């Protein structure tokens, strides 16, 4: 491998999760990488060997294990020789949009993780299996996606950026940036039909619907997704 084409291995679970943005960015950058997807039962053995006990991990040229999907996303963006994925002249716009996508994700997190790790929120480990727990998780998720809820708010923030920047992508132009690589999987998360109490038809904002379809139709990733918006 040369310095121009590093040997990259990205290890994550076989889900979109926080690694999908990184996979997308490498794909748009035209950079080959090993898309290593482990099964959940393999994780128990690997976890203690990772620097921070989490996935994704990435290695470059068989070097040390690197962590943090945000760092990987920016690294992948920096490898795009056209400069379109992580444009230095639009750095503030890109990072602002990345920040909004991050807030969106942070706001959704308790609705998701209360169902997976209730003890992180001060409840008993089996709270998610109790009648009260199931009802609370349902209420939180339903309220989040309901018209006028947090989903509406964050999609409006994103659609305002798309409109302000010319109606194509979050930061304008005819090519996506790393902010789009982050935002689109986050949006599609609500339409793939895999989250209890979330109606896959919950995204109605027409600017967002068109945006996700535009992104998913890009030649580099056309056909990648078979569910949700842009399928
Ligand atoms: N900020 C980290 C978060 C990493 C993280 O929390 N990964 C989760 C999966 S999304 C994980 O490894 N969970 C398994 C565990 O904690 O044992 C990143 O973006 O890379």
Image (spheres, rainbow, N blue to C red):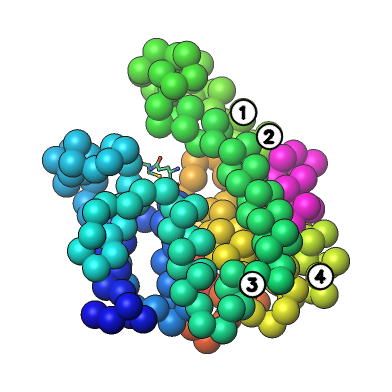
Disc on res. 161: none
Mark found first going from the N terminus, 3 or 2: 3
**Residue in view at x 45 percent, y 14 percent:** 123
Circle number at residue 139: 1
113 sits to left or right of 203: left
* Towards the viewer: 45 or 129: 45
Residue 193: image x %, image y %? 50, 53
Closer to the chain start, of discs 4 and 2, is 2
Kindly state the secondary structure of the residue where label 4 is placed.
Answer: loop
Confirm whether residue 165 shows in the render: yes
Q: Are marks 2 and 1 in contact (CB under 8 Å)?
A: yes
The residue singled out by tag 3 in the image is 87
> Residues under labels 4 and 1: Cα distance?
35 Å
Quadrant of residue 22 within the rendered picture: bottom left
What secondary structure is marked by label 1? helix
* Residue 89 as seen in the image, left or right of residue 196: right
Image height check: is 101 above or below 224?
above
Q: Give yes or no for residue 118 being in the magenta stretch.
A: no
């Amino acid at each position: 491998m040369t310095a121009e084409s590093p040997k990259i291995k990205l290890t994550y679970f076989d889900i979109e999760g926080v690694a999908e943005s990184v996979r997308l960015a490498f794909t748009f950058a035209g950079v080959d990488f090993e898309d290593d997807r482990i099964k959940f039962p393999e994780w128990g053995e690997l976890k203690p060997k990772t620097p921070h006990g989490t996935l994704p991990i990435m290695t470059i040229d068989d070097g040390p294990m690197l962590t943090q999907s945000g760092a990987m996303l920016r690294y992948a963006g920096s490898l795009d020789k056209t400069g379109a994925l992580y444009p230095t002249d639009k750095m503030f716009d890109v990072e602002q949009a990345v920040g909004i996508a991050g807030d969106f994700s942070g706001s959704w997190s308790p609705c998701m993780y209360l169902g997976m790790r209730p003890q992180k929120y001060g409840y008993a480990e089996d709270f998610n299996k109790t009648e009260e727990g199931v009802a609370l998780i349902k209420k939180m998720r339903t309220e989040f996606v309901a018209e006028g809820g947090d989903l509406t708010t964050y999609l409006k923030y994103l659609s305002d950026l798309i409109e302000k920047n010319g109606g194509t992508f979050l930061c304008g132009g005819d090519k996506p940036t790393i902010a789009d690589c982050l935002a689109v999987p986050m949006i599609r998360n609500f339409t793939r039909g895999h989250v209890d109490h979330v109606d896959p038809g919950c995204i109605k904002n027409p600017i967002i619907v068109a945006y996700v379809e535009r992104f998913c139709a890009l030649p580099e990733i056309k056909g990648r997704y078979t569910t949700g918006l842009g399928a």
